[in-house]
Amino acid sequence: MELFDLKKELAENSYPGRGIVIGQSEDGRFAAIAYFIMGRSVNSRNRVFVEDGEGLRTRAFDPGKLSDPSLVIYAPVRVLGNATVVTNGDQTDTVYDFMKEGKTFEEALCTRTFEPDAPNYTPRISGVVERTDGAFTYKLSILKSGDGDPDAPERFFFAYTPKAGKGHFLHTYRCDGNPIPSFDGEPTPVKIEGDLDAFTRLVWESLNEDNKVSLFTRFINLETGEWESRIVNKNQ
């Protein structure tokens, strides 16, 4: 299968919205994760990523400009044992709570649907990395409206066998528009290149300068479970 150039995929799309990349580092030693957010409105652009224990949280950069926190303030990343959950909304907590009870990623997301932000009906995208005995598996999911119909929710799940230097990229929007068209098809297979810092630079520098807001990246050592993260915020 052809691996697409992640830099090109990002640079040629002015508004992929929010995006998740999960895969394996080029040297095979790490599980690689990236999560980014973009924004067109003042409310969406008024955000930063901040560490929250082992995970991540969004926060208003200027609290005085925060008009509606419901879809912009949430925990994108939470860690449960050897599992790392990353999503574009409060479904992170749903997945975390279900998995804590011994249930599955899929069971959790079957209780959720797309965001209530008509007419866009923004998809909920989610991923999970589970490390065991020096190896790992990962899954991605998208919950969307069928052809923009709010009465026709669709749920898609994808499970992958990791391969060094390979990842999968899933984002909320196909491109910019009004209303904004939802992502179609399967997550894009992409190259994962370089170390954590190189990976971080590639993603951040490839995102549209006007619309990018924040980026989180993490490499998880497959042997030890130790992780290292980077956070880049346009609002500093």
Image (spheres, rainbow, N blue to C red):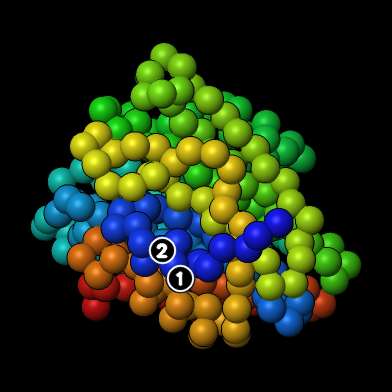
- Tell me the residue at 67%/31% (across/down): 107
- The image position of residue 167, as x and y in percent, is 64, 62
- The image position of residue 129, as x and y in percent, is 68, 57
From this viewpoint, is residue 222 visible? yes
Residue sitting at the far top: 151
Q: Measure the alpha-carbon separation of dots 2 and 1.
A: 5 Å
From this viewpoint, is residue 96 visible? no
Q: Quadrant of residue 78?
A: bottom right
Considering the numbered disc 2 on the image, is that residue within a helix, a strand or a loop? Answer: helix
Residue sitting at the far left: 64
- The image position of residue 191, as x and y in percent, is 61, 69
* Residue 176 position (above or below residue 162): above
**Amino acid type of the residue that numbered disc 1 sits on in the rendered structure:** Lys
Q: Where the C terminus falls, by quadrant?
A: bottom left
Disc 1 residue crowd, few under 14, some 14–19, many 20+, Cα 10 Å: some
Q: Quadrant of residue 60?
A: bottom left
* Residue 11 position (above or below residue 171): below
Circles 2, 1 touching at the beta carbon (< 8 Å): yes
Residue sitting at the far right: 133
- The residue carrying mark 2 is 10
- The residue carrying mark 1 is 7
